[in-house]
Image (spheres, helix red, strand yellow):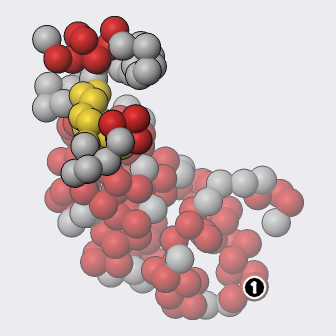
Amino acid sequence: MAMKRLFCTSSFCLRHVPFSCMIRILHPPLANPAWCRFYSEQLSYTKNTESNENQSLLSNLEFMGVDITMARKRQPGILKKMITHEESLRKFLLAKGASREAIASIISRYPRAITRTYEHLQKKWDIWQSILKTDLHIIKIVERSPESFFRSGDIENL
C-alpha cells in the first residue's frame, strides 16, 4: 500500500521504474524528506541468465579447467553461443607448447578466444612468428595478454 501511495505522489517521478527493481527510500535522521536518496535492488525472482547458456560448452570448459565465473563476468554472451571452437583452440595451443593451466587461464580471462577458428589462429600465429621467431615467446605474450593475440581484426592489414 505504501508503494502505491508513493507512485501516486507528484514529488516522486517513479512511473518509468522497471518492475524488476524495488525502490527503497532512505531517510537519514533529521533530514529533509525531499532530499531522500534512492537506490534500486534486483528482486530475487528476476530471470536467471545462466539458463540460456550452452550447457555442452560449459561442461567442456569445466573439463578444461576454465574458471566459468570469471569468464561469465568478463563476456557473458560468449557462453550462450551455439558454435564455438574451444577444442580446436585447446589443440592449437597445446601443439604450440602451452600448458593446460595456461590454456584454462587464457580462456578464463578472454573467453572470446573460443570463437576463433583454427585457420584464423594459424594466420595470426604466422604473422606473430614472422616478428618473434620462436613459439615460446609468442606463448609467453599470449599468457600475459590474451586479448592482444585473440582480438579480431583485419589480418591482412597487420
Q: Which residue is mark 1?
A: 131
Instruction: Please provide percent x and percent y for residue 93.
Output: 43, 71
Q: From this viewpoint, is residue 134 visible? A: yes
Q: Please report the residue visible at 28 percent of the width from the left and 78 percent of the height from the top.
A: 101
Regarding residue 79, the answer to whether it shows in the image is: no
Q: Is residue 10 above or below residue 82?
A: above
Image x and y of residue 85, in percent: 42, 48
* Quarter location, residue 20: top left
Viewer-side residue, 109 vs 114: 109
Percent x, y of residue 37: 36, 43
Is 123 on the left or on the right of 11, as rendered? right
In this rendering, position of residue 109 left or right of residue 66 = right
Residue at figure coordinates x 31%, y 69% from the top left = 104
Q: Is residue 131 left or right of residue 10?
A: right
Q: The C terminus is located in which quarter? A: bottom right
Which of the 4 quarters of the picture holds residue 129? Answer: bottom right
Residue type at the position of mark 1: Ile
In the image: residue 134, left or right of residue 38? right
Toward the right, the furthest residue is: 157
Graded by Cα atoms within 10 Å as few (under 14), some (14 to 19) or many (20 or more), the crowding at tag 1 reads few
User: In terms of depth relative to the viewer, which is nearer, 11 or 81?
Assistant: 11
Q: Residue at x 34, y 64 (%)?
A: 108
